[in-house]
Amino acid sequence: MTNIFSWERFWNIIPKLTPYLLITFQIVLVGLLFGTLLGIIVAILRLKKIPVIHQILSVYISFMRGTSMLLQMMVIYYGLPSLFEQIGININDLDKLIFVYLTFVLNLGAFLGEEFRAAILAVSKEQTEAGYSIGLTAKQTFLRIVLPQAFIIALPSYGAEAIGCFHLTSIAFKLGVVDFLGRANTLGAASGHQLESYLFIAIVYISFSLLLRFIFVLLEKKFSFGKKGATA
């Protein structure tokens, strides 16, 4: 039994894995930050229904929502260098982590774009009319009234995407990017003992997921309370 699991090995593995948690957090933060910005742009362009752009975005969203992130990462990693070679640009020497970042940004941009679009449509027209009535322009009304309310509406699904993003970071190891889980795999393969590593990973994943869920629940309650107070 002691050969299968050892508390000594468990405590020894923690300092070896913890530094690689930073790479996992970097992927999540970059993906969420730029994915959110892309999602807002996608949502706005989809609502405007600009010819050609609307069709291109429809194909982009269908691909991102209809395929696995692993497939998307492989298409980006192998497809982009080939595409850039056609115009004489070599990107084969780029850090593999950049391709991972790009995959997460494009994936989240598609999912969040649709969620933001639905949230914007859910904001009542009376809110827009109220903005016009106090002298705001269409742009000011959207930025100051519609977009903040849409974000509150989209907050639950945004929290779910954030948690899902954290769980999916393990695919980076497929490109040779050694993140938290990737390092656990290499240590386990070298020592022949993987249970301790996976137990620590499970504890971190569950703890971080619960923390994120707690934060977003608090945000939902805070903004919902503020919204009720404003409309009371």
Image (cartoon, rainbow, N blue to C red):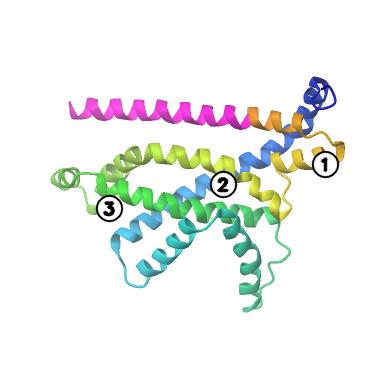
Residue at 15% across, 47% down: 129
Element type at marker 3? helix
Q: Residue 139 carries which label?
A: 3
Residue type marked 1? Ala
Residue type marked 2? Val
Relative to 71, say whether 221 is above or below: above
Q: Which of marks 2 and 1 is in front?
A: 1
The segment highlighted magenta reads 204-232
Is residue 218 within the magenta segment?
A: yes
Mark closer to the chain start, 3 or 1: 3
Residue indicated by mark 2: 30
Side of 207 relative to 41 (left or right): right
Relative to 77, say whether 226 is above or below: above
Of 215 and 144, nearer the camera is 215
Mark closer to the chain start, 2 or 1: 2
Q: Distance between the residues labelled 3 and 2?
A: 27 Å
Labels 3 & 2 near each other (Cβ < 8 A): no
Side of 69 relative to 154 (left or right): right
